[in-house]
Each structure stands twice: as structure tokens, then as C-alpha cells.
Image (spheres, helix red, strand yellow):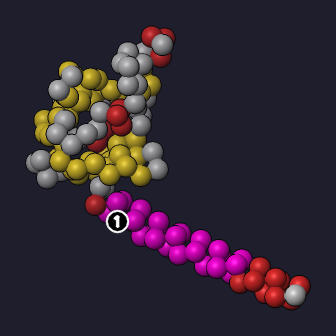
Amino acid sequence: MIKINRTIFIIGIIFVILLSILFTIIDNKHIGRLNREYNKNITDAENINSKIIKVEEWHGVSNITLDNGDKYFLVGADNYSYSKVDLFDYLVVGNKIVKKKGIDSLWVETPEGRFVFIVGESINRDKK
């Protein structure tokens, strides 16, 4: 009886290891696809004035596709002046991204208004 339980335990461990390997392979393929598809950092962009048509978030990075066909990745940003502090809360299909050449600020236009962020930074922390 103990031998059967040990066998089931070993099979269970092997199953968990195989599942972990499979999920790691799938995760790596997905990350590789995102890195190839969204290989432009939005902070390097010249002028943007386009609507978001697709958003893919993955491990603290948002990947967005704009209606002009450009695809960018964005790391997090916070602006404590707003009730929703995190930039990612504003990256929604239909919202507009505006960025001017030579400026590190990024504006997101939503039906509720225009919100400014500096990608990779937290601003107005003293407001909360």
C-alpha cells in the first residue's frame, strides 16, 4: 500500500515538473512574440497623436497598437494628481495617446479628460 502511494507521489511530482516546463516554454514564446512585435519604446517616439486600438499587458509592461499602425511598449508611470494613479488604467482601446517631439511627457485623452504622465516615473507623489 505504501508503494502505491509513493508511486502516485512520484508521478504527481513528474507531472508538476512537466507542466512547469510547458508553461515556461509558452511564456517565453509569448514574451518573444511581444518583444518582436512591440519593439519601439514610446519614450523614443517623435510625434504621436493616435487612438489606441489594442492593448496587451504583460509583467508590468503595456504593449499598445495605435490606429496609425505603430506599436509601442511602455513601462509603468504614476501621476498622484489623479484618482487612478497608474498610467496602465488609462491605456484603454479608444483612448488617444499624444506625445510631442523632444518632450518626455505623454498625454492620454479619455472621455473623462486629458491625463499627463512621464513614462517610467512617478510624479506628484506629494499630492496623496
Q: Quadrant of the N terminus?
A: bottom right
Q: Which residues are magenta?
A: 12-36
- Is 25 covered by the magenta stretch? yes
* Label 1: which secondary element: helix
Amino acid at the residue labelled 1: Arg
At 20% from the left and 21% from the top, the residue drawn is: 113
Residue 15 at what x, y percent from top left?
A: 64, 79
Q: In this rendering, would 54 be left or right of 18?
A: left
Q: Residue most toward the left?
A: 68
Q: Residue most toward the top?
A: 127
Q: Taken as a whole, is the magenta stretch helix, strand or loop?
A: helix
- The answer to which image quadrant residue 10 occupies is bottom right
**Front-lying residue, 72 or 90:** 90
**Residue 101, visible in the rendered structure:** no
- Position above or below: 23 against 89: below
Q: Which residue is mark 1?
A: 33
Residue 55 at what x, y percent from top left?
A: 28, 48
The crowding category of the residue bearing disc 1, from other C-alpha atoms within 10 Å (few below 14, some 14 to 19, many at least 20), is: few
At 42% from the left and 15% from the top, the residue drawn is: 124
- Position above or below: 10 against 102: below
